[in-house]
Image (cartoon, rainbow, N blue to C red):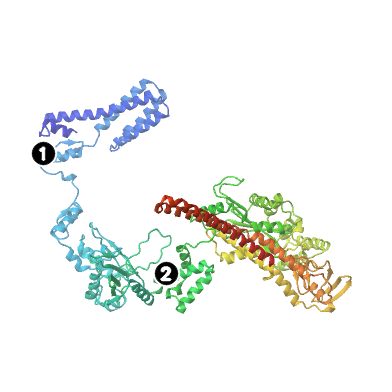
Amino acid sequence: HFSVFSIIFFGDCEEDDLRVSTCRHIFTIIHRLSFVFIYFLILTVYYFFFSYSWHSFLFFLLSFHFYFFYFSFHTLFFEVIFFPLLYHFYLFLLTSTFAFLLLFLFLHFYLVLQIMESAESFSCSSCPATYTVRRNLQKHCRMKHGAPARQFKKEIAFNCSVCGHPFRYKSGLNSHMRTFHNQSNTFSEHVEHLQTTHSTVNAQVQCEKQTSLQIEEIISKLLKILTNTWKATKIFFRRNSLHCLRIHFQPSHRLLDMWRLHPQEQGELHARYVLVCVFFTRHSLLVQHLESQHEMQIELEHLTFQSLQAFHEWKFNVEQQTFTLYVQNTKAYITSTGCRHIYYDCHRSYTYKPQHSQRTPQDSNKIGFMCPYRMNIVIKNSGVELSYWKTHIGHERLVKSIPLHTSIRSLVADKINLGVADDRIIEDVRNDGYAGVLPARAQLFKRQDLLNIKREYKITYPTYRDANDSKSVQLWVAENKGNDKFSVLFLKQVGQPGYNLDEKDFVLIIMTKVQSKMMKDHGVNIVCVDGTHGTNGYAFHLHTIMVVDEVGAGYPVAFCFSNRQDEQLLTLFFKRIAKATGIIETKTFMSDNANALYNAWANVMGHPENKLLCTWHVNQCWERNLNSKVAPAKRGFVSKRLYHIREILDVENFRKQLSNFVFGLQGSRETERFASYFQKNYVPHIRQWAYCFRKSLGINTNMHLESYHHQLKEKYFKRRVTKRMDKAINAVLGVEKSDQQGRISKLNGAVKSSRERQVQKIHKETSIPSSNVISVGKNKWRVVGTNGDEVYFVTFQNNTCNNLCLRCKQCAVCIHTYSCTCIDYFIRTMICEHIHSCAKHCPIDTGFDRQEYEHNIVEKINSDMSAYMIEPATTQANASSSFAESLDIRYHQLAKNISKNVSPQLYEPIVRQMEAFLEEVQSNTFQEVGKRNLNRKMDRQRK
């Protein structure tokens, strides 16, 4: 400001003029007093307006930061300003008197003036003049001494490598090199190939247009790299506004001077590598260069086709025969004569640029430069003319590098829509590829290709609604809430409060109408509950309720997905089931060793008559603790003795043997640890695991649920954890639908259950002679086993029931006709070999009536089919409703079109006729639907 003021008022005067010196002193005093006045204003404001509150402290901090910014260049700031200021400020806050405020201001102003006086000064090297601002010293040196102040100039940092001229800035050196020393020719003599990456040919540049600093040093570095190593190395140089210089040594990207610099490697490199040189803006220049400089023969062929379709057919055959693919990278252009030009390049040309960041680096088919192979077609009215460069350079023709053809993708999509299994599709496509029915690429068809086709053709599973998994599940539940197919459909999303659960908990409960009916019919006998993991990518547990039907087959009746498996969650699960089916007073409840399942069931449904532990789970626990708590020498004996005691069927004998067994375990140091574990966990609960307390209950293990879990994970999940929740829902519903179809087949006798097949096997393999079957009373026999050591008693109980149950048709008996004292009958609920022997050697009339039996089967099938047909009937009604809506929409469209083209006198009669016709069509449609449903019902009754 002083310099401008002095020029305006005093003109061009000397620096030591009295007026100028006086003015400078005046400006310095004003400059200092202005800051003193500003600070006095700040202190006064916060003193009179903020009243020592926290606002005053905040205001003090703001003013402190302002002063810190201003005085930051002073070295004595912290010593002279900060600490005294802070000290006096605290003193002022403590005393709170106006006198201390004045004292504080006086001390502070004095310190500020001291800072101003001790500011840094700049002295002239030619005269004793000093300045507080560097810019004023430079101006003094130019005006007073006529020479630049070199001590403040930038040091020389760059020298020309040709003439040695010094430069302080690199831009000056570059300008000098371009003006006086043309370096492009020198550089091109040494390096004729600069490999870089560009997306199109038009973006590529020539190497000769580049210039750089210290050319000889760069060339020596390049020669050193070429001589010592062939590892991939990148060297970047300063670039101008148009061109980029990048050298990248790779086995497939060499310098053109390779064999000139290393003649001993000329033969090997010429045979093994493709040498790519300069960058060209046109394909013709590239072909010309390869033929002239590299002596490569680029084969060119000209063909003519009658139509564009004929050209595409020929192109497809060439691609399949040569394992290549030709793609159109640029848009077709039309010449002034009306001809269309289209270019097809080799699909391996150029460089792949991913559109998004990839988690795992993927291999690319791109080779990093342009392959000279090209098709140039000119489409005219008379036909299609083709210029065909047939030579590939820089890559081999591999089958894996070409994508699946549209014919393969459409064929696979059709098979997926037909419901063919994924493994079968993959096998069929590969076989057709090897047989030559499909293109050779089909030989490499894999599961990822199948997933890509599903994504491309938008082939999804029935429960898919959205790409977001959580939203998809929510939409599916909302869509099926009012569907008659489901009895229970409860969803509690993550983040949703309520139901006495945490917000982070997830709960989904599913129960269909068919499952509800099965629960009411068969839940009174046996109910099995168990959980499994590994069905989804969120580590949610799948809890399943299963019942056992008439023929001894398991049927899942409810599903629950949740992140929890405690009693609180299971109570909510069972309450939702009880709300749909009512209280199920079951006779036998089986679960694993945890008490949460039983306690939750008892709280909701009431205590069952029998609580059983799954034998398989009990065996697992025993084996695990025997291995950890019993010495190896006695482990086998203890295990054999324990299993033998469990299978004793007489209660008194069991209790006596168990007491002796526990006493023996406690008396040995090698088994006392297992004795305490067994005494604590199993002795008080003998009714849950001993065979003598589960006679004739119809179940021993939870293998129905284990078989269901195995089928779910093996058939539907392929032993892989599905990532999406909606796909897991589709899987469990698929298992339930499969069980529906299997049950209908079993009721009709087309398929036999595993227990029925086992009964047939026992009947066929029974080899007990008649001499071993001895009558000991009316309808009672003594049967000696096959080994001759064991004796069993078979008793005739009742006539054969003519209902659907486990039976042997050859013997005309069912599971209720005879009883036996063996484990197969009492525990496994099986028609044992002893019963088969009595039925063979001592036949009696069991009262079996085949007609009544088949009549009962038909009634059972019709009863179950009424529940199964809910979904098709609903679908039919929806279809008829949508058809009526489409007719109504079409009617309004026709009426609107008629009103535009028909006179008003004819419009109303035509519309009335259309309305009458529409009503007639709709009534006929619903009548046809009703007749069709009635005919189906009559057919089922006749069957």
Q: Earlier in the sequence, mark 2 or mark 1?
A: 1
Q: Quadrant of residue 521?
A: bottom right
Residue 232 spot, x, y in % from top left: 32, 67
Q: Along the line of sight, which residue is nearer the eye, 75 or 92?
A: 92
Residue 599 spot, x, y in % from top left: 70, 51
Any part of residue 690 in sight: yes
Residue that label 2 marks: 406
Amino acid identity at mark 2: Thr
Identify the mark at residue 144; answer none if there is no mark.
1
SS label for mark 2: helix
CA separation in Å, label 2 and label 1 = 86 Å
Query: Which residue does the image show at 31% across and 24% down from the upper left?
Result: 106
Other residues around mark 1 within 10 Å, as few (<14) / some (14–19) / many (≥20)? few
SS label for mark 1: helix
The C terminus lies in which quarter of the figure? bottom right
**Which residue of the protein is positioned furthest toward the right in this rendering?**
777
Query: Which residue does the image show at 73% across and 74% down from the upper left?
Result: 760
Left or right of residue 461: residue 118: left
Up/down of 651 relative to 500, above or below: below
Query: Which residue does the image show at 16% across and 34% down from the upper left?
Result: 4
How many numbered callouts? Answer: 2
Other residues around mark 2 within 10 Å, as few (<14) / some (14–19) / many (≥20)? few
